[in-house]
Image (cartoon, rainbow, N blue to C red):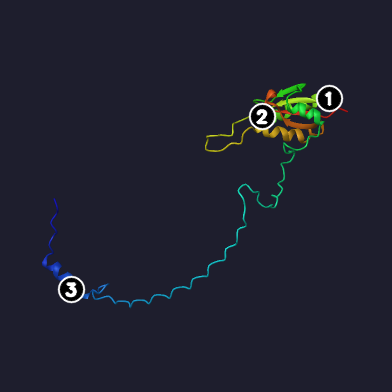
Amino acid sequence: MKRRPRRLHPEEAELWRKVKATATPLHPAGPKPVKPPEEPAPPAAEAPPRARTPVEPFEIGQRAGETAPPPETSARPGRRPADSAPRMDRKAFVRMSRGRIDPEARIDLHGMTQDQAHGALVGFIARSHRQGMRLVLVITGKGRGEDDDGPIPRRPGILRRAVPQWLRGAPLGPMVLEVRQAHRRHGGEGAYYVYLRRAR
């Protein structure tokens, strides 16, 4: 139910009339001044059309003109591009790349931390070099796949990326002649061939 508005008593009504008589309205009633219509601005002069550069005739499949070569990017320390020229005998390199040379020894770094793997690798390469071995196999595993569904992307294969750097840096660099990805017969992307220098 709606409540009926309370009526003012005669004393209240008289007091309200006095207050109302002394008040100044904030917005006095009256017609608002009308602004004269503004004259439209003169239309801007159109810029002359740009001259089109003529296109030289060409045929589909035609090679584009020579462009400037891309700037050289510095490789990571201790890493060489996979297609760089081998430092070992070319014939032996081809046989090794095709998996036709069996490694004389191997080490599996699966399940090791970086510190454990580094220590094990240094000891393995030093022993193999002292014993006069030429080709050894280092198994790192492929690591986490490229497709990671998690919210934070993770770089795959920590050992897979670190081992080539360790083999080309100190203290193993002077003992190592070549580092290449193994043939699929010996582990493929999850392993490396390490061709050692001759022991002196």
Report the amino acid beneath label 1.
Arg
| Residue 123 in view in this figure | no
| Residue 178 in view in this figure | yes
Which disc number belongs to residue 73?
A: none
Label 3: state its secondary structure.
helix
The foreground one among 171 and 104 is 104
Q: CA distance from mark 3 to mark 1?
A: 116 Å
Say which residue appears at 66% left-offset and 29% top-offset. 189
| As drawn, 49 above or below 95 | below
Q: Is residue 41 left or right of residue 94?
A: left
Which disc number belongs to residue 130?
A: 1
Which disc number belongs to residue 18?
A: 3
The foreground one among 160 and 50 is 50
The reply to whether discs 2 and 3 touch (Cβ–Cβ < 8 Å) is no
The foreground one among 28 and 143 is 143
Label 2: state its secondary structure.
helix
* Quadrant hosting residue 8: bottom left
Q: Nearer the viewer, mark 1 or mark 2?
A: 2
Report the amino acid beneath label 2.
Glu
The reply to whether discs 3 and 1 touch (Cβ–Cβ < 8 Å) is no
Could you tell which of marks 2 and 3 lies nearer the N-terminus? 3
Which disc number belongs to residue 189?
A: 2
The reply to whether discs 1 and 2 touch (Cβ–Cβ < 8 Å) is no
Q: Return the x and y of residue 91 as percentages of the image width and height.
A: 80, 29
Q: CA distance from mark 2 to mark 3?
A: 98 Å
Q: Return the x and y of residue 53 as percentages of the image width and height.
A: 60, 62
Say which residue appears at 27% left-offset and 75% top-offset. 32
Label 1: state its secondary structure.
helix
Q: Return the x and y of residue 29 as percentages of the image width and height.
A: 23, 74
Q: Return the x and y of residue 177 as percentages of the image width and height.
A: 80, 32
